[in-house]
Amino acid sequence: MGFRKFINDPVHGFITINDPLIFEIISHPWVQRLRRINQMAMSYLVYPGAVHSRFHHALGAYHLMGNALHELKQKGISISEEEEQAAKIAILLHDVGHGPFSHALESILVKDLEHEAISLMIMHALNEQFNGKLTMAIEIFKGSYSKKFLHQLISGQLDVDRMDYLTRDSFFSGVIEGSIGCDRILKMLTVHEGSLMVEEKGIYSIENFLVARRLMYWQVYQHKTVLSAEMTLVKILERAIWLFNNGDREISASNGLGNLLFNRKSQFDNHFLEMFCGLDDSDVMSEIKRWKSHKDSVIALLSDAILNRNLLKLRMQNEPISAEEINYKKTELALALDLKPEDANFLVFTGIAENSLYNLNDEKINILYKDGAVRDISKVDAPLIHQNLSQPVKKFYISFYKTQKKPS
Amino acid sequence: MGFRKFINDPVHGFITINDPLIFEIISHPWVQRLRRINQMAMSYLVYPGAVHSRFHHALGAYHLMGNALHELKQKGISISEEEEQAAKIAILLHDVGHGPFSHALESILVKDLEHEAISLMIMHALNEQFNGKLTMAIEIFKGSYSKKFLHQLISGQLDVDRMDYLTRDSFFSGVIEGSIGCDRILKMLTVHEGSLMVEEKGIYSIENFLVARRLMYWQVYQHKTVLSAEMTLVKILERAIWLFNNGDREISASNGLGNLLFNRKSQFDNHFLEMFCGLDDSDVMSEIKRWKSHKDSVIALLSDAILNRNLLKLRMQNEPISAEEINYKKTELALALDLKPEDANFLVFTGIAENSLYNLNDEKINILYKDGAVRDISKVDAPLIHQNLSQPVKKFYISFYKTQKKPS
Amino acid sequence: MGFRKFINDPVHGFITINDPLIFEIISHPWVQRLRRINQMAMSYLVYPGAVHSRFHHALGAYHLMGNALHELKQKGISISEEEEQAAKIAILLHDVGHGPFSHALESILVKDLEHEAISLMIMHALNEQFNGKLTMAIEIFKGSYSKKFLHQLISGQLDVDRMDYLTRDSFFSGVIEGSIGCDRILKMLTVHEGSLMVEEKGIYSIENFLVARRLMYWQVYQHKTVLSAEMTLVKILERAIWLFNNGDREISASNGLGNLLFNRKSQFDNHFLEMFCGLDDSDVMSEIKRWKSHKDSVIALLSDAILNRNLLKLRMQNEPISAEEINYKKTELALALDLKPEDANFLVFTGIAENSLYNLNDEKINILYKDGAVRDISKVDAPLIHQNLSQPVKKFYISFYKTQKKPS
Amino acid sequence: MGFRKFINDPVHGFITINDPLIFEIISHPWVQRLRRINQMAMSYLVYPGAVHSRFHHALGAYHLMGNALHELKQKGISISEEEEQAAKIAILLHDVGHGPFSHALESILVKDLEHEAISLMIMHALNEQFNGKLTMAIEIFKGSYSKKFLHQLISGQLDVDRMDYLTRDSFFSGVIEGSIGCDRILKMLTVHEGSLMVEEKGIYSIENFLVARRLMYWQVYQHKTVLSAEMTLVKILERAIWLFNNGDREISASNGLGNLLFNRKSQFDNHFLEMFCGLDDSDVMSEIKRWKSHKDSVIALLSDAILNRNLLKLRMQNEPISAEEINYKKTELALALDLKPEDANFLVFTGIAENSLYNLNDEKINILYKDGAVRDISKVDAPLIHQNLSQPVKKFYISFYKTQKKPS
């Protein structure tokens, strides 16, 4: 009558934790912190239900990993108890390196360090605290462990990470057509020559999975209002840094966020992890609330945009935004708000939204045929995924503050 | 405080009937009969939940029609009360011409008369009974009514018929990845120059709808076991006809089914509709139960296959089945079961399963852009539906009785 | 890499069959027959989605049994592989003795033999066919096996049978408030001194389960229209027997149904089981279709009521129906339809609908407290189930044919 | 082609906003603020999905109000457009007076002022801003409007507020047995002599609704871990006030929270509403994060409990906690942590959890019988709600910090 905890998940039902080590890891403050980081950043401004946490996603992906390994073992794939524990720990911690508002602020909070790299740093630190019990998990996470398929389940074009976040994000946002039937996909997984494969009869499920992901990208993750809000979040922090660099000391905050933003060297400190793991969405949000009343009208205005959903307009198009339009918009705004030209850069900006249906250059999704043949999902008979591959879909956007608002 | 009835639908919630004429039509024996016709024919042998009736589908499509018209009216499209009633009646009756086991037996029960044609015959007969109140519904159904979009909502590549059956079949079979978000699609519908269109922001939903339909085709409707069972059903009736034509009088049944099968002229009778509308799945099933003990071993064996799920094997491939294989299988079986060569034709047979993701030659699904441009769903930017269009996917199958069974 | 089959269930997800013996039992014609028996008899005339089969319910209950045993084993309860297999077989076959339209016709088809008794007869017969491999399953089913809790999981006030049918009937009928959270209840199960118990923290779930069952009884199973239809079904068969006994030989049918109805001794035949297991809903339905045109106007009228949903009226009340009203209605009808008095008995009849929230005289639902105390669910603190126990709720109904119909 | 906005809700589907005034109210910063207030306070520490916002609930209740009014109008109840708008505004704003963490902090943040009172203050202030357009909404909210049933839909034992929060909380927490079938209940509503009533056939749905609410109370809202966390939140703020009152100036915060906590007169300020409406969960959370490192070990320890889920133990029982136990626990803790006796009060505390299945003293839920009789839900035949009424269920709890933690 061993150790058992259940966590209620409206998405997958009950999630079981039956390993004290895993429970201890989940209980660690650095993991608990993920409860305060929204999985979908600013999407809730369009989809009010999309407020689930990165903690919940980590648990969900852990649950799917357990199911995947169970299926593979039933098919005769050899997986030891130690490997199972390690794979579960690795997926549980795969996103632990995310900071406030996850992807939305990834590029600005910590320079030149992607969240996966920080996840790895955290895993190493935890491994010390847990006396080396995470060593195999780290190997699996890095892809250096001999059984390659364990890594593929964590990081690939068909990993349990994606399966959980698509299912979960679809559920909470209410975009039901993003549902992917992950239970069926899990049952179709197999291992061939050490690599993760999908059984032949799973082809349609995989195609559906890729198309659902495409839909979620454009309809939810890169929805123009969501994009506008998330880019505004970035601009707020950029403006804060700019103000700090221009001598504004009131902008600074006492918490770790200020330290990270205004002291770029801090990310090479001994205490970086501790500081970083002290941060969550509330740190950013409380600063934004403060900055809404800051004397700099640009940061005040951007902060208000987020807090009161007075969002910047955003237009997407297939061609790059013309320099003329950008200049015109900036000039117009500078005049209307009596701003200096360089200030307008924070209120008028452009960018590219980009997504691939399936990335030919990434690790492939391979189909294992009954006759032993292996083919890429884009090479099956009558493939749906065919030549949409050649290049990712790119959309160019311009986002700009509108001086006059009206109910639209 | 008018007339109102509610019907509980696990798929769409409550379905409201607030028009006495529509209630009378639903109450008509020819419509009530659809309660006894399985929407998905033999799919329940693979998906045990797929036992919903064609009656339920008719109600569901009627419900979606109501929602679609409501949305269009909110967008300022002019639709009179009479047109609304007519469109609802038309969709309610669109499939009323289906006979036992719907599509599965469509080709064999009534020769050269598709179910749409029979639906139309029934509508005309009902129109007489209801003193001409179905006239506009018939026009809409036939496509001769001036507002083309009403017909397109009933019969097109994006009609409420498909929206309901995909949603419903996905729900009852438990193949959740077939879900299509029909509420969102309905909200994206509009009318432009008299034709049904989809607003620009509905593109991804439409792509998802088409891909979900493709998945449902190959994973459910044309699942090899389903196909095997449905073709076996056809072979049973073909064998019954063959026996009758070869002098077997015990094969005949007193009910309408026998009349239809063994007296091909009956379909030109005055009483054809009455006879046809007296039939449902139970007529076929009870004959099969009788034939399971018939002295002809072929029909007995085929009937047993359906009743006790001792189904014929079915193999699908991308190339036509070779004449050699067909002959070999027939000879082998004739020897094993001591059959005449011509008898083996009923136990070894081939066919083609075919489906288009999107039919370029059919009426198109048009996207209406904000700038007023109209483009086919296959012509949008970065289309998913691209060149999978050139021709439908075809799969060739051979189905054959296996003399030795074992748990597979 | 053992034997594994998956069956898609919209209610519980995938159902796994990983035991060849169990697969063989499921494949047996006597079990396959349950595919053609509607779980909820005539409920589909009110809830069109309620068309799922008794086969589907058997699979679902089997699935929950597997989950229940898994939970108990995790809690340290000793259950051998043989016992697990036996308990699964027992639940799979618990309802195999149901005939056409299940409960609705139970009292009329086979006299003085409840479906459980027939289930047991079938299990014994199957046990012979399967060389004694069902012996332990039979013991568990009968309650003679030493581990009493295995029997309680099959037959009690909190068994997996009820858990599945409430969940499933709620799902298919769309009466979502009948949902009972069976996953949570399963996790709360435990065994104490050999008996099935519920952990203390499961009290509210159990109360909710009992109240949901009460709701399903009165809102669905005993819905007045459902009751009317099911009683009409009984009256049809009673009338057929009456006609037969009065010399009408055309009423007789060649199939097993006729044999059973008109030759009451047949149920003591050697061939009873074979005959009985040859029957399903389609046998009754095809006879009703024939009888709709029978020369006896009473059976014709009742048959039409079912087929075309021209149902008899039914009124429920808390007091017994007065003799005066019954006589008045019969006389009125005899006059209107020119019937003999004794014929009117088939068109005007009364009955009692009855249900207990919780049966104090049946085996109790026991709660195991953390301190080791055991208390009946009606004896917990602040119990919801309190004194509604003293006696079951009884409602009296009269059902009668209405000569004049109008849209109601 | 009027004004229309859709909001995607995983619970109710699409929520439509088709009134510019309502859209403006929703867009107001004081309403947008509700996006940053968790509907279920600390429940997410047990149910990770329970992170939906009070904003989402307000929209959901607004949606149900629209549906309820639609049903009533279909039944011939006279409701003008202005009344409909007013009722929708009233429900939209019914909870706008909630502060950070809603109920959990209601008693401590603002003294002697319940959230309803603050909601009313805010409505009055908004009414000024919107030039009196909220006057009727305020009357309905207060219950002074002539059509009493409109108020009952907002505030009663069967209002759309409860219907939405039970449905929504059940959905997000994953406690599916809390589902209440609110669509059916809405269809059963009617108005009789100016009062809201439920049609006779809705009795079982209402019973189920009350029992589901009871389950949600004890299993979710008053779950011992949730209660522990929410009481700890209160203790943190109490300790902060205590520290402030004892001269600790570092405890103070610059934001409105500090102002409110440490300057009790502020709630009578002219600027109270502005200050109050500037607050949300992030203000409390960011202070707790700061206080985790505060020099006072008591507040540091309590803050850590919340942030890192090192929660205080909580035990519930039916009898009051004995003074002996309380004293023993306090002494034990004071010794272990080297605290002064008065400090221990913040780490060991008791309370009462209380809930009524149905409150006989509150406004009743009345059933309207077909014969015109009106009976309270506790007075129907064979009532489930019977004598559980006499008094609410009370549970006594003690909560205390455990010095030694281990995986439990």
Image (tube, coloured by chain):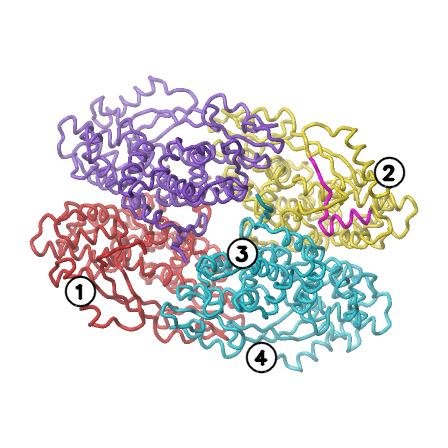
Chain colours: A cyan, B red, C purple, D yellow
- Asked whether the beta carbons under mark 3 and mark 4 sit within 8 Å of each other, the answer is no
Task: Sort mark 1 into few (<14), some (14-19) or many (20+) by Cα contacts within 10 Å.
Answer: many
User: Residue B193 bears which disc, if any?
Assistant: none
Seen from the viewer's position, the closer of residues A326 and D290 is: D290
The subunit letter for the residue under badge 4 reads A
| First of labels 3, 4 by sequence position | 3
Q: Residue A71: where, in percent of width, then height?
A: 47, 57
Seen from the viewer's position, the closer of residues A290 and A252 is: A252
Residue type highlighted by circle 4? Glu
Is residue D303 shown in magenta? yes
Q: Is residue A1 left or right of residue D306?
A: left
Residues beneath discs 3 and 2 located on the same chain: no
**Element on which disc 2 rests:** helix
Q: CA distance from mark 2 to mark 1?
A: 94 Å
- Give above or below for A319 relative to C22: below
What residue did someone put label 4 on? A319
What residue did someone put label 2 on? D342
Task: Sort mark 4 into few (<14), some (14-19) or many (20+) by Cα contacts within 10 Å.
Answer: few
Image quarter of the C terminus of chain B = bottom left
What residue did someone put label 1 on? B330
> Given this view, does label 4 or label 1 mark the residue nearer the observer?
1
Residues beneath discs 4 and 1 located on the same chain: no
What residue did someone put label 3 on? A66
- Asked whether the beta carbons under mark 2 and mark 1 sit within 8 Å of each other, the answer is no
